[in-house]
Amino acid sequence: WALEMLMDYLIYWGNSGTGTIGLFTVNSPTAWSSIGSSMSVLYTDAASTGTAGQNMYKLFAAAIRSFLNNTYNKVTKVRVGMSPLAYNLFSSVNYSNVYNPQSSLKTFMDNFMAGETESGQTPDIEIFPEPLFSANSTFNPLMTDYMVISAPEIGTGPESAPQPLIRFGAPLMDFVYPVIPGQFMTQYRMLRRVAGVYAPWAPAVQVYTGFGI
């Protein structure tokens, strides 16, 4: 469990002391306030008027549209990780209290067409909650949470053959060795050697701070 958590931390934050690159260090994080209000603020301010879901949808769609514009609509997959608080708001608040009872997330997945590729298909967009992105948590002492938009693949060549954009190097995943060699009933340790994130094309990663709170 400790190794898995530390590896997740390195994937996101990296380690400046060892020169390990993480998703948060591929590009400097952007404050969500440059896009608009956070999901929690929108929910608090607009819940009584029934427009919170619409505002969430518009801002999130603008961020995804900007990401696809920067990648020239060539990406075949888009992964969006957000804090559980942001995910729960985005997936439960009605798009409209008057016209549409479905959540903003459901509306986005049904209606989003801005990322249509030249083959007439939309990219595969996955939205998931990530506890490590939560504000004021074990690995994130800040009062703002994180959201990461990434494209693990891109279409290349005339046929848009998928090629990887983001890799996490791990030359040695599991190595078990005794603490004191030759001793009977001794404890064992597990070693894992990782090289960090390899993301040669910067537009494939976009990090925001303060999306949920």
Image (cartoon, helix red, strand yellow):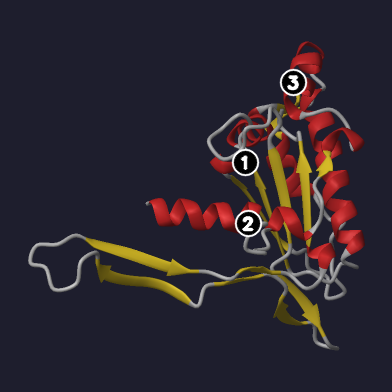
Task: Give the residue pinned by disc 3.
Answer: 43
Image x and y of residue 53, in percent: 77, 28
The relative height of residue 118 versus residue 66 in the rendered view (above or below) is below
Q: Nearer the viewer, residue 187 or 73?
A: 187
- How many angstroms separate mark 1 from mark 3 (CA)? 19 Å
Q: Nearer the viewer, residue 83 or 3?
A: 3
The relative height of residue 135 versus residue 67 in the rendered view (above or below) is above
- How many angstroms separate mark 2 from mark 1 (CA)? 17 Å
Q: Nearer the viewer, residue 105 or 6?
A: 6
Q: Which numbered disc, 3 or 2, marks the residue that appears first in the sequence?
A: 2
- How many angstroms separate mark 3 from mark 2 (CA)? 35 Å
- Element marked by disc 3: helix
| Residue 15 marker | 2
- Element marked by disc 1: helix
Task: Give the residue pinned by disc 1.
Answer: 133
Kind of residue indicated by mark 2: Asn
Who's the residue at 81% across and 71% down the image? 201
The quadrant in which residue 95 appears is: top right
Image x and y of residue 63, in percent: 85, 46
Image x and y of residue 136, in percent: 61, 29
Mark 3 packing: few (<14 Cα in 10 Å), some, or many (20+)? many
Q: Which numbered disc, 2 or 1, marks the residue that appears first in the sequence?
A: 2
